[in-house]
Image: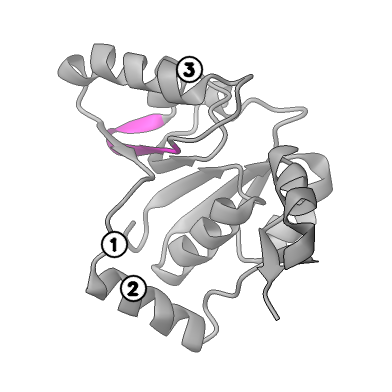
Amino acid sequence: MQRGQQVLINGAAGGVGTFAVQVAKALGAEVTGVQSTRNLELVRSIGADHVIDYTSVDFTTLGTRYDVIVDNVGNHSLGQLLRALTPSGVYVGNTGGTPESGLNTRLMVETLVYKPFISQKLRSVLARPTRDDIETLANLMENGSVTPVVDRTYALAETAEALRHLETCRARGKIVVTVR
């Protein structure tokens, strides 16, 4: 992400999304967050310039094109997402997903099919952060540009409950398990 780019974060209120919104803003991007109605204000509060409520609007049909799409949800086909990208845009897909979305398998297959025929870049959220990456994130957190959003905190003995909550895909920000 770079200063002045148009960045869309699909799943902007989740654990990865809340960080992605704040990092993109700190790097000077114009950020659009996609999430449900109940999370509009949360995503605005962490810096999104624009918000889209996916329960009433499909961002892939609006005609707006983004330089970067970070997809934490996997609720669109790769073809739909590529139409929402600029010709030199970058799609960053989460390799996780739910059994219902089939995100892992579907996007891997679609990527293999599309990649030789498109100008856009396809990337995965799975990364190998460098020391510079970690230092940059640490600096953003130290200067207050990035603040973790915590949905709930659980004791270590409640880890199973924490995982059940996480599996609902309704967590707002991070789930924290404390060890005392």
Which amino acid type corresponds to the residue marked 1 in the rendered image? Answer: Pro
The spot of residue 14 in percent (x, y) is 64, 50
Res 80 seen here: yes
Mark 3 neighbour density, 10 Å: few (under 14) some (14–19) many (20 or more): few
Horizontal side of residue 173 vs 76, given as left or right: right
Q: Residue at x 40, y 74 (%)?
A: 137
Numbered badge on residue 93: none
Question: What whole-number distance in Å separates the C-alpha atoms at marks 3 and 1?
Answer: 28 Å
Position in image of residue 132 (x %, y %): 24, 74
Crowd rating for badge 2 (residues with CA inside 10 Å; few <14, some 14–19, many 20+): few
Residue indicated by mark 2: 134
- Name the residue that disc number 1 marks: 129
- Residue 6, above or below 134: above
Look at the image and say whether residue 84 sits in the magenta stretch.
no
Q: Quadrant of the N terminus?
A: bottom left
Q: Is residue 1 left or right of residue 84?
A: left
Q: How has the structure been colored for display? A: one colour
Q: Are marks 2 and 1 in contact (CB under 8 Å)?
A: yes
Using the image as rendered, state which of residue 58 and residue 14 is in the foreground: 14
Dot 3 amino acid type:
Ser
What's under tag 2, amino acid-wise?
Ile
Residue drawn 27% across the image and 56% down it: 128
What residue sits right under mark 3 in the picture?
Answer: 77
Q: Secondary structure at mark 1?
A: loop
Residue 28 in the image: state x and y as whole percent: 41, 67
What residue span does the magenta drawing correspond to?
85-94
| Residue 86 among magenta residues | yes
Task: Answer yes or no: is residue 83 visible.
Answer: no
